[in-house]
Amino acid sequence: MTDSPIIKLTAAEIAEKIAAGELTAVEVTEAHLARIEAVDEKVHAFLHVDREGALAQARAVDDKRARGEKLGPLAGVPLALKDIFTTEGVPTTVGSKILEGWIPPYDATVTRKLKAADVVILGKTNMDEFAMGSSTENSAFGPTGNPWDLTRIPGGSGGGSSAALAAFEAPLAIGTDTGGSIRQPAAVTGTVGVKPTYGGVSRYGMVAFSSSLDQGGPCARTVLDAALLHEVIAGHDPLDSTSIDAPVPPVVEAARNGSVAGMRVGVVKQFRGEGYQAGVVQRFDESVALLKELGAEIVELDCPSFDLALSAYYLIAPSECSSNLARFDGLRYGLRVGDDGSRSAEEVTSLTREAGFGPEVKRRIMLGTYALSSGYYDAYYGSAQKVRTLIKQEFEQAFERVDVIVSPTTPTTAFPIGERADDPMAMYLADLCTIPANLAGNAAMSLPCGLAPEDNLPVGLQIIAPALQDDRLYKVGAAVEAAFVEKWGHPLLEEAPSL
């Protein structure tokens, strides 16, 4: 079963075969569970595998089909869920010791929508603690390996979800993107990851890191699969005050009818230069040439405020995290340390946070608390918000000239585990290209654009679209994907090493 051809099928193909009776949902789920059992000890994509729950969901799909009920477009398709979404009766840890073993009493809206669509949730995936990181090395439960080279990182913070896709442990996954944590893992694992427009997917039940930036989104191995999943999880949610009350863009239709003919595609000069790996730049330049071949007009853009995006982000995100993580006090749920009757509540809270939070989380809480403190608020947090406004304005001006913007997703391919562990600034630079879209709230996608010649590792192409124009991502992404596969083949399916 670990080598079952089922695990190489796309999500769309699996759903079609289940609906046609060529496969059962149980067969599909068992094939993926067997794959997880065979390889995840090496990959460590999952923190919790819900074998019985997954099989029960699969049996329910097969029962529906036997009764002649209509099945949804992803019914019976297995999925790996980032361990930041609450899931009733299943552990949700956010990669942190402070929530180790916590069993939520309710489902996040994303979780609820997946269940309603009869998607089979295989389990919860590994992640940087509280989504703070670019490598999944900050997980309290150990790092995840990149299936292309297990000594390298699978991206972060959603490295478990991207690794599960690249290791063929699941055809679909869910991630979250605060500064690039869906797109950067997709880039370094040769998969597809989408950050929807901010507010396009509900944050209810998604453990908060930075509330004005966090956004859940779909992860897959093809653009169409990502679109099908996007359509399932998107939409207005009255339980989330930041949720957009607007129709979901026609992402599936766009993915089925990909084209860039007549479109204006922007290339920002700030998204290249010092620090970019030569092979990444080469593959990006080839992608731009391909877009031109497909009928797109290439427009050079100058967005000087983008150079300040990294600095602004690392003031805004830590400031919001210092506020959001104040709820983890050891008094209401999760870990509690030192409660022996001799200590005050303040002492118990302090001991709990010392034991429960990892170094990166503590670093960001301290940075954020400092930036918000009296006398520094305007100088740091206030200034960062002004830069954020400038970035948003430059995007608006750019989108008056172009339909989408393209760039490398991340400046380098996957780096070795441990290489940047003692250099936070080097780690933060992994999000150089992805952060501006989060600050502006725009929609963005990463999809594979080949392998870097110097290390034979995947490179990602980022596409950015205006807010509420998510369908443009899929229209362009599907066209690029089809042309790329026709020219060079699919890197994940044809060149990825076997585990």
Image (tube, rainbow, N blue to C red):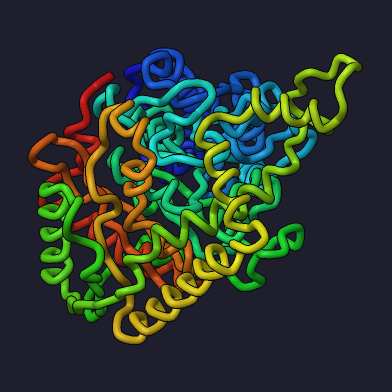
Q: Is residue 88 left or right of residue 75?
A: right
Quarter of the image containing the C terminus? top left
Horizontal and vertical percent for residue 152?
28, 28
Instruction: Quadrant for residue 395, please give it.
Output: bottom left
Which residue is at 69% across, 35% downward? 87
Q: Is residue 312 above or below residue 92?
A: below
Q: Is residue 485 visible?
A: no
Q: Is residue 29 left or right of residue 476?
A: right
Q: In this view of the protein, which residue sits in the foreground, 298 or 454? A: 454
Q: Is residue 454 above or below residue 40?
A: below
Q: Is residue 110 left or right of residue 364?
A: right
Q: Is residue 450 visible?
A: yes
Horizontal and vertical percent for residue 257?
33, 66
Q: Is residue 485 above or below residue 84?
A: below
Q: Is residue 473 left or right of residue 102?
A: left
Q: Is residue 142 above or below residue 329?
A: above
Which residue is at 35% across, 21% downward? 4
Which residue is at 39% across, 36% downward? 135
Residue pushed farthest right? 341
Horizontal and vertical percent for residue 209?
60, 47
Q: In this view of the protein, which residue sits in the foreground, 490 or 242? A: 242
Which residue is at 73% across, 36% downward? 328
Quarter of the image containing the N terminus? top left
Instruction: Quadrant for residue 40, please give it.
Output: top left
Q: In this view of the protein, which residue sits in the foreground, 490 or 218? A: 218
Horizontal and vertical percent for residue 239?
76, 58
